[in-house]
Image: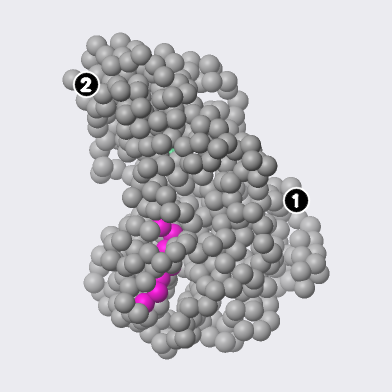
Amino acid sequence: MLTTNPFDDDKLKEECAVFGIWGTKDAAAHTALGLHAQQHRGQEACGIVCNNGDEFNAHRALGQVGDVFGDHRVMERLEGKAAIGHTRYSTTGEPNLRNVQPVYADFAFGGLALAHNGNLTNAISLRNELVQTGSIFQSTTDTEVLIHLIATSKGKVRDRLITALRLIEGAYSVVLLTRKKLIGVRDPRGVRPLVLGKLGDAYMFASETVALDIIGAEFIREVEPGEMITVDENGLTSEFPLDKTDSRFCIFEYVYFSRPDSIIEGRSVYDARKHIGKELAMEFPVEADVVIPIPDSGVPSALGYAEESGIPFELGIIRNHYIGRTFIEPTDEIRHLGVKLKHNANRGHIEGKRVVLVDDSIVRGTTSRKIVEMVRDAGAKEVHMRISSPPTSHSCFYGVDTPERKSLLASSNTIEQMRELIGADSLAFVTMDGMYRAMGEDSRNNEAPQYCDACFSGDYPIALVDKENKGTGQQLTNLREQRR
Ligand code: AMP
């Protein structure tokens, strides 16, 4: 059974970071650093494939970047002037080495490695048809579908890639490496991020600008939605091989997923979060003595809330940094335990006070419930929960891990019911308009929303082909006919 089906309960969904560099010695070491800076996008596994002008070498393993690539014996094998890398995070299902990217394949024209951040929404349909026509899959990732589409297309690498891109649907930021070139490409909606940087004569792609910072590279620009940039011995070439459409960058990257010190679309993620916190304070003020963030994700928006409301900000909850994200734990019981391991009340700043707790989102409600209880146990007089995003009521099918819809607290509860469930005295979420205002947009009503906000609105800008199809049908055949 294909466990990547995002519509299965037993799903294996991915959040990821990519990195690719061309034209520097120690390309793999640069890639390892680039991945390290993007570790927050995926902690389960990582991999690097590099090329030394002749042969490819790869290392992939379960674990975090520092552990996997901190071993000099591994790095010594990865020599060459070009490399791509990937970090990956999945929630349920077996952590499986065969799913670790970059994927690599030998073609008639030579080797090709590919790494992907995002989620293809017609991967199951395409895969079923590819299997019927003789393709043999080694992994359960949607990324391998792309490799097979390249394999079954004709022409040079560039042409094959374009043919493949025309057949896939979904959110993707992809880096691809052959002996002769490095390619970075972003889906036409630009849902997931991808930036271009430069260090000396070397060019690189990364999911976030923090990966450029760590190696001292200069940020050149974002790869635009639908853009394909090729780097080779002649320098850079940019083209837009796919049909143009309105871009819809993922607003959840600003809310939670990206690092606060990253810059996206010229805007600091930290500032965006702070602005949302200010909007939240304007929309849902409350009489209180202290504003406390749920660390780390709630910190910038809590600062904004405190600044706007004039209520003092304190680190009333301290986070233990030596454990992973609680989300990684598969069962509710472990998740409960995980939250306790992760946070502790800083009693002196809570006792006898009316507390405003700020977090970026409520998903299943586990974190909020535990923290509200913890803050009450520490002697808070009142606990007011403020969330710097609208209620997360819909699953993401574009590459941010969210549980299936029925596990989302906001999918089946009113705000008042949620307040009761988490045990707060009051609960409020920034409105959709407030969030868009904070992003510098007048309102989201402008006929076309500027972001993908499907997790809050249920408005999915890219067709959920597999969901509608249940993974069957003549997808590939029809698409090949239409898009020939
Ligand atoms: P929950 O405890 O299920 O309500 O999850 C909410 C917490 O998880 C918040 O503190 C968020 O910062 C964090 N969070 C939200 N979305 C994600 C995600 N996709 N992956 C990991 N953590 C998340």
Q: Which residue is mark 2?
A: 349
Magenta span main SS: strand
The reply to whether the magenta stretch includes residue 245 is: no
Looking at the image, which residue sits at the far front? 442
Residue occupying image coordinates x 48% and y 41%: 439
Q: Quadrant of residue 38?
A: bottom left
Q: Amino acid at mark 2?
A: His
Q: Is residue 189 left or right of residue 167?
A: left
Question: For the N terminus, which image quadrant?
Answer: bottom right
Q: Does 204 appear in magenta?
A: yes
Picture disc at residue 55: none
311 vs 418, nearest the viewer: 311
Tell me whether the residue at label 2 lies in contact with that at label 1, contact meaning CB atoms closer than 8 angstroms. no
Residue 114 x/y as whole percent = 51, 70
Q: Amino acid at mark 1?
A: Asn
- Magenta-highlighted residues: 202-208
Q: Element at badge 2?
A: helix
Query: What residue sits 79% from the left and 61% below the top?
Result: 474
Q: Camera-side residue: 433 or 174?
A: 433
Q: For mark 1, what is the residue?
A: 469
Q: Quadrant of the C terminus?
A: bottom right
Q: Position of residue 182 (x, y in %)?
A: 47, 76
Estimate the x, y position of residue 35 in percent, counting from the top left. 36, 61
**With respect to residue 220, does 317 lie above or below?**
above
Q: Residues within 10 Å of mark 2 (few under 14, many from 20)?
A: many
Mark 1, Cα crowd under 10 Å, few <14 / some 14-19 / many 20+, is some
Figure check: 2 above or below 281: below
